[in-house]
Image: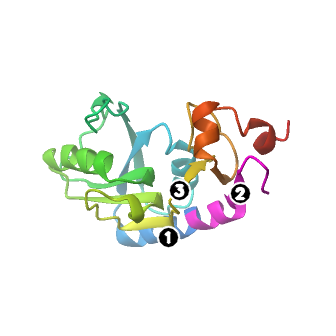
Amino acid sequence: MTGSDGARILHDGGDLAAAAARLGVEISDAYPGGVLFVAVLKGSILFLADLVRNVTVPCEVDFLGISAYTEGTGRVRIVKDLDNDVHDRHVVLVEDIVDTGLTSTYVLGELRRRGPASVEVCTLFDRRARRIVPVPVRFAGFEAPDELLLGYGLDVAGRYRNLPFVATGDREALEEDPEAHVQQLYGR
């Protein structure tokens, strides 16, 4: 699907399901004794739900809420902390997208400070082209193009998260109007 306003589907539901299944097997093989998933709210929720349904070892899920970047600083902070203790546990940080690496680096530092047995990153999209800080991504669904992505948890101003596919969006159009792709992507 492509339109005059520049949105097009990059990965359909089948692609996303296949990636979650593959990653579920990889994580199950890596942690036969079990794993604690720590997901970053809100974008990772749809991916996390599909991922854990494909994991065949005992697992638990916990969530971190991270603030938006502080204007001009590139800094984030934890606004919702974990309910579980990660000490001596195998932890997999689940992200929707690892982009510049700034948020992942901050979260990984916080998790490592708490003494887990191990901590690795699992992301649906790994966008290495925009990386500022090196982030070791052990489990990745797709390499992300240097385009704005929408759907399956990825949003612009809270919109598009519930789309069952991932589409690219026209950055300029969405900056002007966050609903610029609603009609095209939702069929209304």
Can residue 80 be seen in this snapshot? no
Q: Which residues are magenta?
A: 1-19
Q: Residues within 10 Å of mark 2 (few under 14, many from 20)?
A: some
Q: Nearer the viewer, mark 2 or mark 3?
A: 2
Mark 2 residue type: Ile
Mark 3 residue type: Leu
Mark 1 residue type: Val
The residue pinned by badge 1 equals: 25
Q: Earlier in the sequence, mark 2 or mark 1?
A: 2
Is 3 left, or right, of 180 in this rendering?
right
Residue 68, quarter of the rendered image? top left
> Residue 43: within the magenta?
no
Q: Residue 14 at what x, y percent from top left?
A: 71, 63
Q: Which mark is residue 9?
A: 2
Q: Residue 93 at what x, y percent from top left?
A: 35, 52
The residue pinned by badge 3 equals: 51
Regarding mark 2 in the picture, which secondary structure is present there?
A: strand
Q: Residue placed at 55% from the left, 55% from the top? A: 147
Is 69 left, or right, of 24 in this rendering?
left
Q: CA distance from mark 3 to mark 1?
A: 9 Å
Is 41 left, or right, of 88 in this rendering?
right
Q: Residue 167 at what x, y percent from top left?
A: 66, 53
> Residue 18: within the magenta?
yes
The color scheme shown is: rainbow
